Each structure stands twice: as structure tokens, then as C-alpha cells.
Amino acid sequence: MENKIAISKSTAADIDRLMEIRLEMLRVVNGLEADYEFSDELKTESRGYFLSGDQTTLLATDGEKTIGCASINYITIMPTFSHPTGKRAFLMSVYTQKEYRRMGIARRMVGQLVGEARAKGCSEIILDATEEGRPLYKSLGFKESGETMCLQL
């Protein structure tokens, strides 16, 4: 089945499909009911970000059916010794529908996004991983990090 799975960069024309799979992912990851309705603010801000944010989002499709997604968001901070370009990336929303898991689809999407980040001169990719996703990321060379702290505003 993997051979007929296509992975492509999303465009503005894909926004409805993109929003549908992203909201599905949020429901699954957060244990919400399939009919859970997200706030208008979350949906509006998400659409706006996908249409104008500094990011790349991939969609995995099986024919006309969207079965997965993955996004990488680009940020630039003040350069440091360990990150002289200041270019970093945040990998998120890596998701494959349950019946398509363990087929290498997420691995292909993440690999493509890592390659793009490298080509853009990023010196680091960070992510928040679910327990289920950790083995994939570790197999791709991601390491656990205890360096960060966070203040919720």
C-alpha cells in the first residue's frame, strides 16, 4: 500500500484538507471525541498560520483521501556559538491515521522536512513528542533534551 501513498507540500488550495487532518490529529492526540468542536479562534488562527506563516506542511494522501500530515515551522533567534545562523525549526503535527501507521509514512514526511530545514541552514530542530512517536524520532537521530524551560503566558 505504501507505494500509492503520495506525500506533497500543501498549498493554499489544500487549506480545507489541511485543516481537516490537523483537527483530526488534535482530537486523536488529546483523546477528544470525533465530533469535538474546536473554538473559532483556534480554527481561524490555524488557517491564517498555514496560509501565511513561515512553515512547510506536508500532506500524505492515498488517492483522494488525506491520511496524514507533518509541519515544520521556522524561527530565527539571535545567533549563538552553538547556533551561529540563529535559524531553528520546530517540527509538529506529525500524524498518520491509525490504519496507515507502521508503513513508513511519518518517517518519509519527517525525513523530507529535516532535509528542507538543513537546506535552509537551520542548526536545530526541536519537537514535542508523544510516547508513541518517540521511537521514530530517536531512530532519526533526535535526542532527549533537558535543556529547555517554559513559562506559560
Image: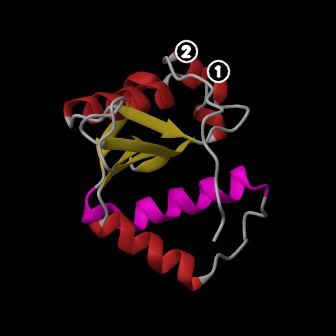
- Residue 46 image offset from top left, x and y in percent: 46, 70
Magenta region:
11-31
- Position of the C terminus, as image quadrant, is bottom right
- Residue 116 image offset from top left, x and y in percent: 26, 34
Horizontal side of 68 relative to 98 (left or right) equals left
The residue carrying mark 1 is: 135
Q: Is residue 103 above or below residue 62?
A: above
Q: Nearer the viewer, residue 41 or 89?
A: 89
At 73% from the left edge and 33% from the top edge, which residue is drawn? 131
Q: Which three-letter amino acid code belongs to the residue tagged 2? A: Ser
In terms of secondary structure, where does tag 1 sit?
A: helix
Q: Is residue 37 above or below residue 80?
A: below
In terms of secondary structure, where does tag 2 sit?
A: helix
- Residue 120 image offset from top left, x and y in percent: 21, 37
Give the alpha-carbon distance from disc 2 to disc 1, as whole Å.
6 Å
At 30% from the left edge and 68% from the top edge, which residue is drawn? 51
